[in-house]
Amino acid sequence: MSEVKISAEPRTEFGKGGARRTRRAGKVPAVLYGHGEAPRHIALPAREFAAAIRHGGKNQIFNIEITGGGTALALPKAIQRDPIKDTYEHVDLLVVRRGEKVTVEIPVHLTGEAARDTLVMVENTTLAILADATKLPEFVEVSIEGLEAGSHVTAGDVQLPAGSELAADPAVVVAVVTGAPTAEALEGETGEAAEAAEAEATPEPADA
């Protein structure tokens, strides 16, 4: 994953009021910390930050140029979003160094098609890996091509990119392949549900 250069300004206002004013100015309140350094409160340009996250995901590496404060290489550790406005409320950024390995969650993409008349149940959409902070994969692919009912894929089955190590339990299930329900079975379930509903709706006879 390539680095994204982004500018930042030191923040001198804190608390909810200061954060609101920062956001109204088109910036995202953020805190930069790690490697024993004192936390630095900064403001990132909202539009550029959002574009970088859309392109690179939550594991996007930022090369941050801080006004009057040098540069820092950082990885988003926690991102708070407004679910209604779909805007970024606050970001925690972890300072990293080139060659340093970090543990991150990366998306799992299923490829291929399982055998006919099966259903694929995704148990985990991400996988924890250990990799160079500046060479994090955007995602890993897991093939389910031709898998029969009763098959499953675990974290240990996933082929990781060179330089990456599995940080999750190898036994963690990523996807399960089951047999698809037949039309007869579905019809039976529908009939049972209708009978149950009819029984509930029928009043019991009053005691004599």
Image: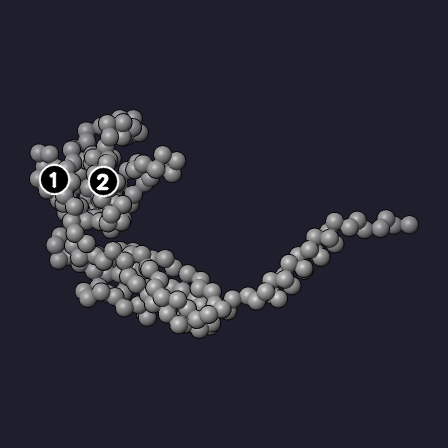
- Residue 1: horizontal and vertical position, in percent? 19, 54
| In-image side of 122 versus 158 (left or right) | right
Question: Which element carries disc 2, helix, strand or loop?
Answer: helix
Residue in the picture at 15% in, 57% down: 100
Instruction: Tell me the residue that label 2 is attached to.
Output: 49
**Front one among 86 and 154:** 86
| In-image side of 63 versus 181 (left or right) | left
Local crowd size for mark 2, using a 10 Å CA cut-off: few (<14), some (14–19), many (≥20): some
Q: Amino acid at mark 1?
A: Glu
- Residue 194: horizontal and vertical position, in percent? 69, 55
- Residue 38: horizontal and vertical position, in percent? 16, 41
The image quadrant of residue 13 is: top left
Residue in the picture at 16% in, 36% down: 8
Question: Which element carries disc 1, helix, strand or loop?
Answer: strand
**Front one among 49 and 78:** 49
Q: Which of disc 1 and disc 2 is earlier in sequence?
A: 2
Local crowd size for mark 1, using a 10 Å CA cut-off: few (<14), some (14–19), many (≥20): some
Instruction: Tell me the residue that label 1 is attached to.
Output: 65
Distance CA(mark 2)–CA(mark 1): 13 Å
Labels 2, 1: front one: 2
